[in-house]
Amino acid sequence: MLLWIIALFLFVLLGYVGWCLGAIRLGISLIGVVLGALLAPYFGHFFNSILSLLTITNPVLVWLLGPACAYLVIYIVFNVIGLAVHQKVDVYYKYKAGDLRMGLFNRLNQRVGVAMGLANAAAYLVVICWVIFVFSYWTTQMVSGDNASSSVKWFNRLGKDVENSGMAKVAVAVDSMPESYYQFADVVGLIYHNSLLEGRLSRYPAFLALAEQADFQDLGNDKAYLELRQRQPPFTEIINYPKAQQMLGNQDEVKQVWTLVKANLPDLEAYLKTGQSAKYDSEKILGRWDFDMNGALGLLKRTKLNLSGPEMQRLRIVATLSFSKTSFVATPEPDKLAFLKDFGKVHPPKKPKEPLTVETQSFKGTWTSDGDKYELSFPEKGQTTLQAVVEGDRLTITGDTFPMVFQRE
């Protein structure tokens, strides 16, 4: 087992180092190892700010390097302290204590140094197992078939060794990672192995406003990216896709996404598995809605009973031209945004034989609710308010010239 080979190497090496350097230096170094591991996650954000000012802009890399730098600084500080204390004690026994006491001290320092070296090895082994456990939780989920690189395969093998050896229990006992870290890994792994879930992900209520942003729409409509996802390449190939890198380089966008993800992780995972959201399903207007032409025309007939056949035919043509691509999107609190997309306005022909022309616009507004009844406000459209009612998977919007009926996407 590879992990036990590493453990044996650590104990032999650091036992010898303890014999050579002595108990004082290895004892203070042990304090540095323990405190570094405990404090690095809390002081890492100081180094994140420094790294973001440098050429490192990848938020994942910054997140990884921040705690690593904090650990290294703490470890170096305690080793410098250990060296300084050792030199002072060594000078005392060499020049002031006499040869006998110096000999006794050196023998004690070496022998206790071996014990301190072994204690350092044990601490290093715990830290190594924790690091392997934390990162292999991700890497084992980001592998499909035999597409992983050799380094990832070796790391996953180490992760299995940690699990099989029982050291995973030790790693869990000292683990300081938040629960959201592992929940997020579960969600990403679920999406990675099921590319069709990306469609469901885009319909999750908390992400509806994000999906209306240009960057996300551009990525979602990229055929090359969709083909890449379908063949399940290594995860690094997906995040290194140029458009994905562009989005990852936008720190404000990454923070916005992570804020939404972190606030909804348990519900998001359940939604991806079942298609049901315990958090948002009670608000019936939320989601994407496609225009229902037959439903809208049927509603028009029921509300205007005196329409003649030719008039109804004319309205059918106008509705088809105006609403063939119309859709509606409603996002949850706190913004409560409403998007009326590709809403058409028919202009009469300038000359008798010319066809009708259609101008499509998209409007952004807000919604308010009163049970199953809603009021929609689109300041750019001109109307003060529109009324909406949700009945199952049917959304009816009235108050405009032409009643609009939508079916849930």
Image: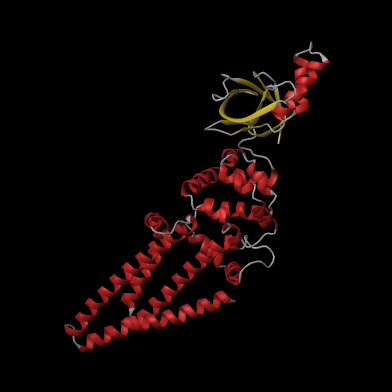
Extreme right residue here? 309
Q: In percent of the image, x 61 and y 35: which residue is there?
A: 280
Of residues 273 and 116, the one nearer the viewer is 273
Answer left or right for 222 relative to 309: left
Q: Is residue 391 visible?
A: no
Q: Is residue 328 visible?
A: yes
Q: In percent of the image, x 31 and y 81: which residue is there?
A: 109
Answer left or right for 214 relative to 322: left
Residue 162 lies in what quarter of the image? bottom right
The colour scheme used to paint the residues is secondary structure
Query: Which of the image's four quarters has the C terminus?
Result: top right
Residue 157 lies in what quarter of the image? bottom right
Extreme left residue here? 96
Q: Position of residue 118 (x, y in %)?
A: 43, 77
Of residues 198 and 215, the one nearer the viewer is 215
Answer left or right for 112 relative to 184: left
Of residues 286 and 345, the one nearer the viewer is 345
Q: Is residue 120 above or below residue 350?
A: below
Q: In percent of the image, x 65 and y 61: which residue is there?
A: 233
Q: Position of residue 383 (x, y in %)?
A: 58, 19
- Number of numbered tags placed on the structure image: 0
Q: Position of residue 334 (x, y in %)?
A: 52, 33
Query: Which of the image's four quarters has the N terminus?
Result: bottom right
Q: Is residue 381 above or below residue 278?
A: above
